[in-house]
Each structure stands twice: as structure tokens, then as C-alpha cells.
């Protein structure tokens, strides 16, 4: 990514941010559901992701490495990685509540996750054909 732009020439900061959000984050967070759950030892994984996001924020903004992390993340337009993981995790759980009861994945879920949650407002079971 450093070859694509620096502070004086190359990609614009908005293009760098778009590259990070669309190409790097999905690859870095692929399979996060396997280690991001209650009771899992996630400190090491979160620390590595925070380091990655800090380096990216420095690259996007072109600031000095002594700049405060939260400030450069805000200027770069990146949400903190822990909040991003929580958002993705919430979407992941919503996806399970929106599948029909006869779906094969429901046989893999325990009863707490499969039946006790109300279906999402645009769940497949609530859609009707006209």
C-alpha cells in the first residue's frame, strides 16, 4: 500500500481510506466469528488489529507516528476496530435470525439461538409474494 501513495503524491486520502475499508479489512477480519465471542481470549487478536489500523491511519493521513491514535483514526474517518467488530458481530447474529425456520443451519444452532429470538423485520419468513 505504501507504493500507492505517500504524503506528497499518489492516491488521495479518501482513496486510501476506500482501499483499506474495501480490500484490507474484509481480509483481516475474515472468520472473526471463530474467535470473537464472549469468554474467548481475544486480547492478542485485538491488539494486532489495533496496530494494523494505526499504521493504516498514519498512512491515510500522512501524520507523524507520534500522533495520538484516536485522533488520527477520527481524522482518517475510521471507527475503532473493537466497535467495528461489534457491529459486524451484531450483523452476523441478525443474519441467523432472518433465515426461515426450515433452513438447514437451524439444525446446527442450539435452541437458545435458533428459537428465542424474534425474526428480523425483513426476515424471509415475513416476506410475501404479490
Image: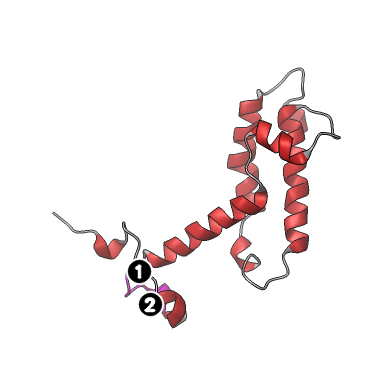
**Residue at far left of view:** 130
* Residue 125 place in picture, x, y as percent: 27, 65
Residue 108 drawn above or below residue 68: below
Q: Is residue 102 magenta?
A: yes
Q: Residue at x 66, y 31 (%)?
A: 16
Q: Which residue is mark 2?
A: 115
**Picture quarter with the C terminus:** bottom left
**Residue at far right of view:** 66
**Picture quarter with the N terminus:** top right
Would residue 130 be seen by someone viewing this image from the given angle?
Answer: yes
* Residue 92 place in picture, x, y as percent: 50, 61
Report the front residue among 68 and 54. Answer: 68
Q: How many marks?
A: 2
Q: Residue at x 73, y 69 (%)?
A: 41
Would residue 1 be seen by someone viewing this image from the given angle?
Answer: no
- Magenta residues span 99-106
Tell me the tag on residue 118.
1
Q: Residue at x 84, y 29 (%)?
A: 64
Report the front residue among 115 and 24. Answer: 115
Amino acid at each position: 500500500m505504501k507504493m500507492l501513495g505517500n504524503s506528497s503524491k499518489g492516491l488521495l486520502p479518501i482513496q486510501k481510506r476506500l482501499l483499506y475499508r474495501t480490500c484490507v479489512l474484509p481480509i483481516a477480519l475474515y472468520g472473526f466469528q471463530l474467535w470473537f465471542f464472549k469468554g474467548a481470549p481475544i486480547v492478542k487478536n485485538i491488539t494486532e488489529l489495533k496496530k494494523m489500523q494505526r499504521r493504516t491511519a498514519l498512512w491515510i493521513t500522512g501524520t507523524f507516528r507520534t500522533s495520538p491514535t484516536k485522533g488520527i483514526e477520527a481524522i482518517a474517518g475510521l471507527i475503532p476496530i473493537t466497535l467495528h467488530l461489534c457491529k459486524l458481530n451484531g450483523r452476523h447474529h441478525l443474519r441467523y435470525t432472518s433465515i426461515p425456520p426450515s433452513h438447514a443451519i437451524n439444525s446446527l444452532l442450539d435452541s437458545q439461538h435458533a428459537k428465542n429470538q424474534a425474526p428480523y423485520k425483513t426476515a424471509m419468513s415475513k416476506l410475501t409474494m404479490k
